[in-house]
Amino acid sequence: MSSSTAFDRNASRAERYDQLDLQCGPLLEDTDAVANQANFAAIVHAAFGWHWVGFYRVVGDELVLGPFQGPVACTRLQRGRGVCATAWERNEAVLVPNVDAFAGHIACSPLSRSEVVLPLRDAQGTVRAVFDIDSSTAGDFDAADVARLQGLLDAHAHRLIPEDNA
Ligand code: SME
């Protein structure tokens, strides 16, 4: 596996996604899904410098914090409230241009201005975790981000989901 990453300082966002596509395969070839979640969060954070990047795992009837990069965050999130739980319950990406306009948004950090949360699905289509990204810039994400990030998660789901979802 690779132990370093490289992103061209002048690269566009699309080019950074291209570089992520190239680097994630070698980076995530280990069989330990927790280690792979940690490196996935780290490489996405390195690529774009977003405020908070990480996983919440489906454990029973709640979401529990997983590997992440950024400030400390809420440990457990309940069904029925917040962006992460919405993505889990809908089994689809949720794009939030302005977190203050999303009813029930859970503010783990006052610096978060926009957010995108995507489902991590197993081979049966069941959501096993969500991948959450917070930006300190309002309106920082669009449909292209959702498509590229969901593509990465779908492509590497078998390396990102533990056998027992531990
Ligand atoms: N904002 C999320 C909570 C997780 S933090 O952003 C890391 C939510 O509303 O579910």
Image (spheres, rainbow, N blue to C red):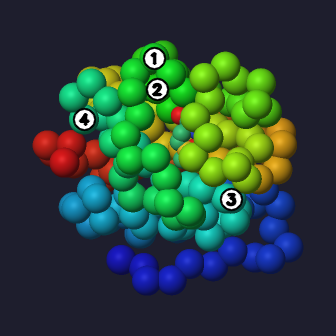
> SS of the residue at dot 1?
loop
Q: Amino acid at mark 4?
A: Val
**Residue 93 in view in this figure:** no
Disc 2, disc 4: CB below 8 Å? no
Viewer-proximal residue, 109 or 31?
109
Q: Which residue is mark 3?
A: 50
Viewer-proximal residue, 129 or 3?
129
Write down the quadrant of residue 17 in the picture.
bottom right
Q: Residues within 10 Å of mark 2 (few under 14, many from 20)?
A: many
State the CA–CA distance, disc 3 to disc 4. Answer: 26 Å
Q: Is mark 3 within 8 Å of ligand 1?
A: no
Q: Vertically, is 135 above or below 77? A: below
Viewer-proximal residue, 70 or 76?
76
Q: How many marks?
A: 4
Q: Earlier in the sequence, mark 3 or mark 4?
A: 3
Disc 1, disc 4: CB below 8 Å? no
Q: Which residue is mark 2?
A: 85
Q: Amino acid at mark 3?
A: Trp
Screen quadrant of the N terminus: bottom left
Q: Vertically, is 134 above or below 38? A: above
Q: Which residue is mark 1?
A: 80
State the CA–CA distance, disc 2 to disc 4. Answer: 12 Å
Q: Position of residue 106 (x, y in %)?
A: 58, 34
Q: Amino acid at mark 2?
A: Ala
Question: Which quadrant does ligand 1 occupy?
Answer: top right
Q: Residues within 10 Å of mark 3 (few under 14, many from 20)?
A: some
